[in-house]
Amino acid sequence: MSRIAYVIRDCGIRHVITNDMKLDQADLLAEDTGELACLIGATEREGMTCFSWDDVYVAATDAAPDIELTEQDLAYILYTSGSTGTPKGIMHTHRSGLSFAIWAAETYGLTPDDRVSNHAPLHFDLSTFDFFATAVAAATTVIIPEAITKFPASLSKLMQDEKLTVWYSVPFALMQLMERGGMDKRDLSAFRWILFAGEVFPTKHLRNLLAALPNVRFSNLYGPTETNVCTYYHVDSLPEDSDEPIPIGKPCANLESLIVDADDKPVAPGAAGELLMRGGVVMYGYWGRPDLNERGFYRRPVFGGHFSDRFYRTGDLVERLPDGNLKYLGRKDRQIKTRGYRVELDEVEVALLSHEDVDEAAVFPVPDGQGSNLIAAAVTPKEGTAVTPETLINHVAARLPSYAVPANVRVYEVFPRTSTGKINRRELQAQAIAESET
Amino acid sequence: MDRENILLGYIKDELLRGRKGDLKAVDDLLSNGIIDSLGILQMVAFIEERFNIQVPDEDVVFENFQSVKALSDYLAQY
């Protein structure tokens, strides 16, 4: 809740869409932020304007709203993990959102007959495909209730009963479906495309999925939230004798990519460097964060230096393969993916350090054996105090979204150190991995 | 102890680890973030170990895990 309150204060949200079952949360948020003015979907709350869903349906008209907007105007802000301990708001315009939606609707040939899954929650940028690309094509979005997403067997039944034609999720969800969903007993013949993004799909599992659904096409989409999606790779076949990860592919239409070294100089062909992206899908900027906007972009001087082209720095290291496809190599910083969610490890450390009895904290990923990571943490208590893992997990859970909460916390008396005296995170991580494997 | 209380105790001690005070058999486990997909797998493993019941994958569905009551009703067939 404190994170939601932070977001409300940070970008000045005044209207909240909710329902009567969540009114007690709305009360807490209203006290915490003092800025909320209007609840949509709530029947009544003292001191605030409320519109029930009945009011909303009665007031709805088919007429377009009378507003002046250009495609360069702000359309939405998505908050994501920030390394300093507070989330950062990624601002997308109508242009940047639509650039992706129109490209995706064309590339995957969406038509009004398509029935597209919405598996990702609304605050996760995968949902922009489910809602915007689907709307562009006048296709149907099938919203999957959150509770169903936790049960592979329920999910495969929904896929069948709803006659889904296009699927989009993180690889983890598809791997769970393969493992426990009983897909072989379902009629999934309506499927045309299965799209995935957010993390690397382990090749051996992807090969099984291709074999299970031979009449379906598969596509790997890549892009930080700041760029919606910026590269794609259609997986038509996989070699039998190699589990080499699939590439992230080539830039989408209307995009220019650069691969640069630490001095922003293009690397030699085939060499590794940071991926920069310019074009329609790139965000407007970070909300209220001039520091991040300065660092987050590379400005390439053009036309005698009087103008510049603005490239987003993805922070992802890539190399270009001889066939032109990009291969993902890793991160420049301490950002990780856990089950498709992006988490800055530093943000989790800041949350742990905010507990009064914690002296030092280290947070690191531990492979979950399913192609993704769980988050593990280690702390040392302040002298004369004692902390339990339970207390700390609750402390973090009150500050961060559930996917960023460490799966376990180990309490040390002293941390192992590197030769330069820093916390030896590598050693702590190795100990946590060894423990998870037993 | 009957299965219902054993399951309640397991969820409170192992999955919630003290995060929520009171948990009743009829409480919705899924919509309030009480258990996530990992928690469901842990519960299936616990049921196997504690009650010696193998829950087949096709029965690990929303309807059977919505609450402790639903789960013990489902397990009653074994």
Image: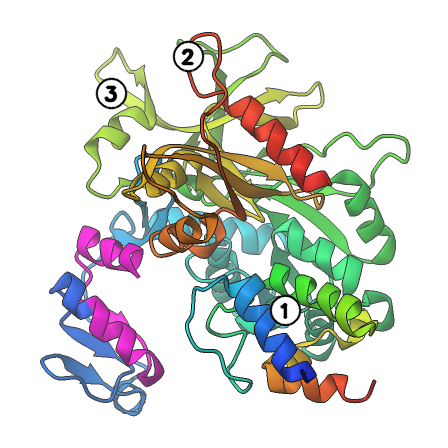
Q: Residues within 10 Å of mark 3 (few under 14, many from 20)?
A: few
- The answer to whether A204 is drawn above or below residue A137 in the figure is above
Who's the residue at 20% across and 51% down the image?
A10
Please identify the residue farthest to the left as the structure is shown.
A47
- Of residue A254 and residue A128, the one placed in the foreground of this image is A128
The residues tagged by marks 2 and 1 sit, at their Cα atoms, a distance apart of 58 Å
Who's the residue at 82% across and 68% down the image?
A182
Q: Does residue A415 show up magenta in the picture? A: no
Q: The C terminus of chain B appears in which quarter of the rendering?
A: bottom right
Residue A300 numbered mark, or none: none
- Judge from the rendering whether residue A358 lies leftward or rightward of residue A333; answer left or right: left
Disc with the residue nearer the chain's start (3 vs 2): 3
Q: Which amino acid, mark 2? A: Gly
Q: Which residue is mark 3?
A: A307
Which chain letter goes with mark 3? A
- The answer to whether B65 is drawn above or below residue A242 in the figure is below
Q: Which residue is mark 2?
A: A421
The residues tagged by marks 3 and 2 sit, at their Cα atoms, a distance apart of 46 Å
Span of residues in magenta: A1-29
- How is the model colour-coded? rainbow
Q: Quadrant of residue A112?
A: bottom right
Residue A114 numbered mark, or none: 1
- Of residue A402 and residue A11, the one placed in the foreground of this image is A402
Q: Residues within 10 Å of mark 2 (few under 14, many from 20)?
A: few
